[in-house]
Image (cartoon, helix red, strand yellow):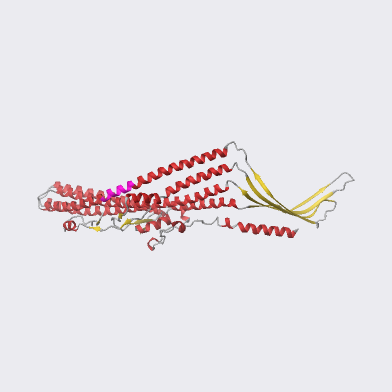
Amino acid sequence: MRRVKRKFLIVAGLFISGINPLWATSSQKIISKTTLQGDQNTNQSTKTEGILYELNSPNDLFIPSRSREVLVKTYKNINIDQLENILINNNRTIKVHLEKINQAKSLLKSSLSSWYPTINLTANGLPQYFESSNYNESNLIQDTSSKQWSSSISAQIKWDLINPARVPEIASARDAFEKAKFSYSIILRDLKLEAKKRYYNLQKANEEIEVAKKSIASSTLGLKDAEIRFEAGIGTKLEVLQAKTQLARDQQLLNMKSGDRKVGQRSLAEILNLPEDVTPLIGSKTKVIGVWDLSLEDSIIAAYNSRKELDSILLDISINNSNANAALAAGQPKVSIVNTSTSSFAKGELNQIAPNTNNTSSSFSNTIGLNATWFIFDGGKSRSLYNYNKSKAEEAKMNFALRRARIRKEVEEVFFKLETAKLNISSSYIEVLSSRESLRLAKLRYNSGITTQREVVNNQRDLTDSEVRYIISITNYNILLADLSRQTGLDNIKPCDIKVDQQNQKNTESKSNLHETNLIPLCQL
């Protein structure tokens, strides 16, 4: 009997090890970042070393408590090509969605386990010792005692042959896993667009600071000229005051744009999740990044095909239908095959006058059969849940149509705004050239005594405003271009041909005290 028991345990162990690979990987990361990123380039640039975090870093649960821990000590130059790499490696929202994918994968593997048999081992005493004494007052019955070591182990193997809830539950879990991956793609695209917006806005702030500095330099020279003319008796106190007023306005512009740059730097650092002591710097200039080489109709079709939001809603429909079928399965019969094996061993005797502790006994039994359960009446619970999930599926269908219409509206809005932004760039470019020439002529007239300082101040203010508007128009165009790329899922931005009005630039070249800001060449928009 010992050999029988040993063989039974060996067979049970081999069976367990045979189905264990299903759960063996449950503690590992099911989905890696490399798998999800697909064709995305995640090669780390040497310029980004030291600002990339590892997944599940100990810093995730660290809260700074001292001022020196949040003091900015390092400035890192970041270009737009590095944004995606830093974003994927650092952004916590992306990492949260990675964990959600792993959670959905684990739930899917959990539901798949219903296809496999289950094994339940039960042991009574490993071993246990029993000792007792029985005393009888009657002389006809002798006193007895018990002394025995015993052990018993039982193994039950159960396999559901018919389980109506199994298929819909697995289908629901599989769709939930796919939906988690779609959610990751959606949030990644949204964050990439937001990072580009913050990058372009920080770029704009840098350019506006340069404009303000050049305006201050020009206003300072204008103030010195006004003071010299006043001291020479050919100018007035009013002209000096007007020059001081313009200088103060330019200083206010510089202060405001410097504050915008600080806010923009920390905003970019936040979405990239840079270390507490690191602030990003941008060295690139504001320029038109390209043109959209696709018609409105083709852009709408591309958006329909690439937007994961629509696929996610289709999965919602499938999940709700699967949940409805699983709810009905609660009132359907379930059939299982069950095999129960029991082995016991005892050493000693029970209820004997003189128990022989060397006496051994063992037994082995095996039972196999079919078990069936059928929950015939549940008060209408399963039917109500079925109707609820079916209604959710119908709701998802209507949401699909609403989302499709909203996608078209979003693409059309961005496309039309992009067309307007093109015209604004051209108009603001011409405005800058005209303002430069007007300021040059105003200064010549002022030096010749034909006009007053007021005209120079007004033209200088117009030039500053026009240069700021020009930078804003290019930034808005680039943001809309990135937004349209996100809406359609296409990187269909074609590098544009440079078109520079050489004659206007030649006319504005002068050794006088004009703004020295270089205009960004226009594209053939």
For the question of whether residue 468 can be seen, the reply is no
* x then y, percent, for residue 234: 9, 50
Which residue is nearer to you in this view: 183 or 151? 183
Quadrant position of the C terminus in the picture: bottom left
Left or right: 284 in relation to 243? right
Task: Tell me: 37 left or right of 516.
Answer: right
**Furthest-right residue in this view:** 139
Residue drawn at x 38%, y 44% as measured from the top left:
406
- Counting every numbered tag in the picture gives 0
Kindly tell me whether residue 374 is visible in this rendering: yes
Front one among 349 and 326: 326
Q: Position of residue 371 (x, y in %)?
A: 67, 47
Q: Is residue 327 left or right of residue 80?
A: right
Farthest-out residue, bottom: 46
The secondary structure making up most of the magenta span is: helix
Side (left or right) of 195 relative to 215: right
Report x, y in % for residue 148: 78, 53
Asked if residue 244 is among those painted magenta in the image, a careful observer would answer no
Q: Look at the image and tell me in which quarter the N terminus lies.
A: bottom right
Which of 244 and 463 lies nearest the eye of the viewer? 463
Percent of width and height locating residue 470: 25, 51
Residue stretch in magenta: 412-422
- Residue located 39% across and 62% down the image: 45
Q: Is residue 397 above or below residue 360?
A: above
Q: At x 56% / y 48%, what residue is drawn?
A: 167
Residue 418 drawn in magenta: yes
